[in-house]
Amino acid sequence: MGMAEINSNMPRDNTDELRWPMEPHALLHRMRGKVESVLIGKRDTVSMALTALLAGGHVLLEDVPGVGKTMLARAFARVMGGEFARIQFTSDLQPSDVTGGSIWDVKRGDFVFRAGPIMSNVVLADEINRTSPRTQSALLEAMEERCVSVDGATRRLPEPFMLIATQNPLRDEGTYPLPEAQLDRFIMRLSIGYPAPQDEIRMLGTGSTAEKLESLRPVVVPDEWIKLQQEAAQVHVHDALLAYVVEVAWATRRAKELTLGASPRASRDWVRAAQAKAYIEGRGFTVPDDFKATAAPVLLHRLVLRSGHETGAARQAEVLERIMQSLPQPVDAAGTGRKR
């Protein structure tokens, strides 16, 4: 019997609460291991993507073509179960191609709603920055409110709902920059990078991408994934760590190099990501290292450099690093002391 069958027949107690077949962090490690089996040598990226999705957020994968962005998204969809849909963003894609719309039903003699691909549990928005800003904006409501408004009616998206978007670097021909409001709705921006030579050799000897993805089976079902997300959101965060998050956010808003700093949504996402990281490691409380590890993926894509300053992701990282080093950091998980 496979993991999907075990989990779908998982015993429940009298309160109808899920009983895990293994410790939740072990279940999450199994998910991570399966994704790593198809994206060889990229444990850090896979771990951070798992953290982001467990936190209930959406992930933006930005990198050059051919390094496995689409494969990573498909692999996560496979191990999470649920309904999967892929939207190939092109210059002629319309908002209704994403959200769905009303069509004339000859038999009924009336208009009926036809759901778009956004009405799925795991949605891959492939090459999202190759379509116009008007079509990109169709995702804003879905990403934040978990619903879409079509023809005057608001329709809820299925639960869970996760968007994994890929984009090519903006220097590529035919790309559009994502609006700041949309970037702010991605909990993390991640890059994969080229594989190390030894990992590329292993990759070439393991068969085709399609074969590797086909071999993946769900580790959890949607109800179990929702429960994992709910438990991760209950991980304790000490007041001193919350104060540190706010201090960093305010420092980015005042930084002379930046015209746009971290939003309150960014602060919330940073806390959620740290909670998820702690939960994956089997802890019921966060520690400063959880926030240090998730700071760059959560915050960097939300920072906009002021005109006249050196541009680029490296410069954004330098600004964030300077800010974090300049502020007192909580000493331990309990937040009982602080240090420079």
Image (cartoon, rainbow, N blue to C red):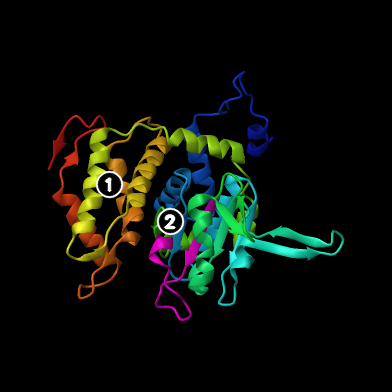
Depth check, front residue: 201 or 280 = 280
Q: Is residue 203 visible?
A: no
Callout 2: few (<14), some (14-19), or many (20+) C-alpha neighbours within 10 Å?
many
Residue shown at the point (53%, 43%) measured from the top left: 31
Q: Is residue 309 visible?
A: yes
Bounds of the magenta segment:
162-183
Query: Number of numbered discs present?
Result: 2
Residue at the spot of label 1: 292
Q: Which percent across, then down, holds residue 312? A: 29, 70
Q: CA distance from mark 1 to mark 2?
A: 21 Å
Q: Which percent across, then down, holds residue 224? A: 58, 36
Queried whether the magenta region covers residue 322, the answer comes back as no
Queried whether the magenta region covers residue 167, the answer comes back as yes
Q: Amino acid at mark 2?
A: Arg
Q: Amino acid at mark 1?
A: Lys
Which residue is the extreme one toward the right? 107
Frontmost of labels 1 and 2 is 2
> Which structural element holds mark 2?
loop
Which residue is the extreme one toward the bottom? 173
Which residue is the extreme one toward the left? 340
Residue 1, image quadrant = top right
Q: Which percent across, then down, holds residue 43? A: 42, 50
Label 1 close to label 2 by CB (< 8 Å): no
Earlier along the polypeptide chain: callout 1 or callout 2?
A: 2
Depth check, front residue: 99 or 48 = 99
Residue at the spot of label 2: 185
- Left or right: 76, with 280 as reference point: right
Q: Is residue 275 above or below residue 59?
A: above
- Left or right: 325, with 302 as reference point: left
> Which structural element holds mark 1?
helix
